[in-house]
Image (cartoon, rainbow, N blue to C red):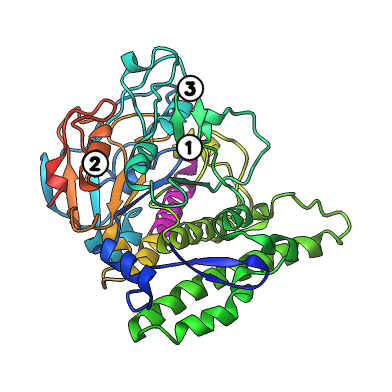
Amino acid sequence: MQTIQGAAGASLALPLFESLAGAAATKLSSKAAKPPVRMAIYYVPMGVIRRGFFPGESETEIPKFVSEPKAKSLIEYKVGIRKLQSLTATQKPLESVRDKVTFVSGLNRTYRHGSDVHAQCGSCFLSSATGETVPSSIYPLNRTFDHVVGDSIGGETPFRTFELSCNSHKDNKESIYFDNISWYGTGHVATSIRDPRQAYDRLFGTKRMSLQRDITDLVLQDARSLQRKLGRVDREKFEEYFEGVRSIERQMDKLSKLKSNLKGVEGVNVPDSTESLMPRGEYIRLMGDLMIAAFQAGLTNVATMMIGPERWNTPYMFEGLFDKPVSHHVMSHNQKQFIGELLKIDKFYMEQFVYLVQRMAAVREFDGSTLLDNMIFTYGSGLGDGATHQYTDLPIIVAGGGGGRLQQGMHLHCAEGTPLSNLWLTQARALGLKGDRFADSLRVETDLLK
């Protein structure tokens, strides 16, 4: 990992530059003939409104609330892979990146009785272990896929895995199983970072903390000196990365000033967490920008983003959608009354996903490829529908080329009974991991691979 140094011991991790002189850079370049393939998860809570997400379901009956998982497959596609055709209302934001994503339908999970539907669908999304392998817990939850991957491809990075959450609330009764998708093992949660400033300090923090100054200011002189040593392409790459980090800093500084100003206003209760003051989309994009910066600088190769918690009734403010905070979970139990609002939320979350896909596509690697070319970025939810709580036909979108190993611009419909863990096993194969099984997987979905 390359860095530049600055005042007060500050240092900023850098992407790999081919034109950087010196033995260390030469060693790095020769060792990294190709950029590493990374993996990220974008988890959406409460499933989706099926009539907005899945082709052919726009005129189906709006389902009533069902307290336990109820299988209701409405998709009648032929099994196999084909070109991605017309996009549905919720998928519409994918239009600009449709040749970079693959829609995977027909994937299922098995519900294990004894725990709440929402708690299991979130906590076990990346695990879904077979029941006999976890006799000590009501959750079919073992070491999650991100940590299995991190054990293999994250060893040489400062952070083997990097866990983020876009849930700023702390005032809820639910257990950790509703609010975490990343687990070291049964009963051992990998706690997510929820505060953008905390995530920034975790990635880039040094002695600057006591000075309350941004790292880019502290390393600016050395950054300018380094820039003069770089070739044209690397200069552009450096400017893109450096300005990206500066943009993150400016946004957090703006929030800190807002919080400081509000403390002086009589009758205003200022929350402890800065992120609580942010519009929902801005919060998600900022956390995603931090994740992308971590990938650019080689700080991690594996990350998870839980976009919202399962079943929490605490309202969120969705800017541009509603004039007051709303509870996604409460509305999902009455789709007939709130169908319009729920469709807007689904599209809103898809728009934030597309923003991150576009950002990854704009980041250039040292060999001329893009971060997205070397990424496996999965959008998904543990429920196929928030009202019926079904564990079948999960909504899955996979973005990125996986280092040239994944199909793109396609739609794969899996055979009946295909477990979600088949997808994780297939991604493991694309990432170079060995092994013929993960959790309750049955096989590699070879149609997804090139």
Mark sitting on residue 20: none
Answer with left or right where residue 35 lies relative to residue 282: left
Q: What's under tag 1, amino acid-wise?
A: Ser
**Magenta stretch: includes residue 378:** no
Q: Residue at x 51, y 43 (%)?
A: 308
State how far apart marks 2 and 1 are (Cα): 38 Å
Q: Residue at x 18, y 28 (%)?
A: 442
Mark 2 sits on what residue? 433
**Which range is magenta?**
336-353
Mark sitting on residue 116: 3
Answer with left or right where residue 247 lies relative to residue 46: right
Q: What's under tag 3, amino acid-wise?
A: Asp
Q: Which of the pair 35/318 is nearer the observer?
A: 35
Give percent across and percent down for residue 332.
48, 37
Q: Which of the pair 348/192 is nearer the observer?
A: 192
Give percent across and percent down for residue 349.
44, 52
The answer to whether residue 365 of the structure is visible from this angle is no
Mark 1 sits on what residue? 332
State how far apart marks 3 and 2 are (Cα): 33 Å
**Magenta stretch: includes residue 339:** yes
Query: Given contact means CB atoms under 8 Å apart, are the residues at marks 3 and 2 in contact?
Result: no
